[in-house]
Image (cartoon, rainbow, N blue to C red):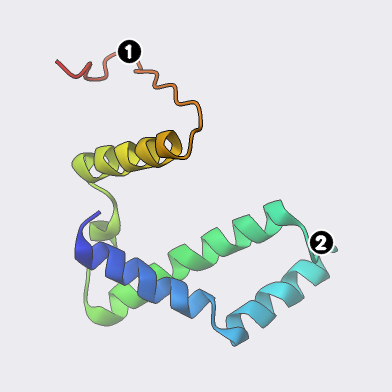
Amino acid sequence: MTDWKREHANASERAIKHPLVQEVMQEFLGNIGRPHGALERYGLTKVASYVAQVARAEALGIDPESLRMSDEELDEHQRMLIEMAYRAGKPVFVVAADGAPDGD
């Protein structure tokens, strides 16, 4: 991921961690009867993350579509995740889908 995209995501994450946002998210989870539901919290955090990133991009005059990872950025990110898992001693299996580049 390019540096400006990472900085943008980090700034958006800080907004999600703001006490006001966290209080509203906790209230919502309580209202749906799942105050400690991990899956619900993950989903709500993901929605909040996208909203924060798009709102911040629009406020800065950036096209929100430019926040999407390019194919090259996605490949780099996946390689980084694989390497992190490998270095942590986790078993790593890579399966190439039909039509995917085979690394030749």
Relative to 26, is 39 above or below?
A: above
Q: Amino acid at mark 1?
A: Asp
Q: Quadrant of the C terminus?
A: top left
Q: Amino acid at mark 2?
A: Arg
Relative to 65, is 7 above or below?
A: below
Query: Residue 91: x and y, percent?
Result: 50, 26
| Front position in the image: 82 or 98 | 82
Q: CA distance from mark 1 to mark 2?
A: 40 Å
| Total number of numbered discs in the rendering | 2
Residue contact between numbered discs 1 and 2, judged by CB atoms under 8 Å: no
Tag 2 secondary structure: loop
Mark 1 or mark 2, which has the lower sequence index?
2
Q: Residue at x 26, y 63 (%)?
A: 5
Circle 2 residues within 10 Å: few <14, some 14–19, many ≥20 = some
| Front position in the image: 90 or 64 | 90
Circle 1 residues within 10 Å: few <14, some 14–19, many ≥20 = few
Query: Residue 93: x and y, percent?
Result: 44, 21
- Say which residue label 1 marks: 98
- Say which residue label 2 marks: 34
Task: Report whether 59 appears left or right of 45.
Answer: left
Relative to 12, is 103 above or below?
A: above
Q: Residue at x 60, y 85 (%)?
A: 19
Relative to 8, is 80 above or below?
A: above
Q: Quadrant of the N terminus?
A: bottom left
Q: Residue at x 61, y 56 (%)?
A: 43
Query: Residue 41: x and y, percent?
Result: 67, 60
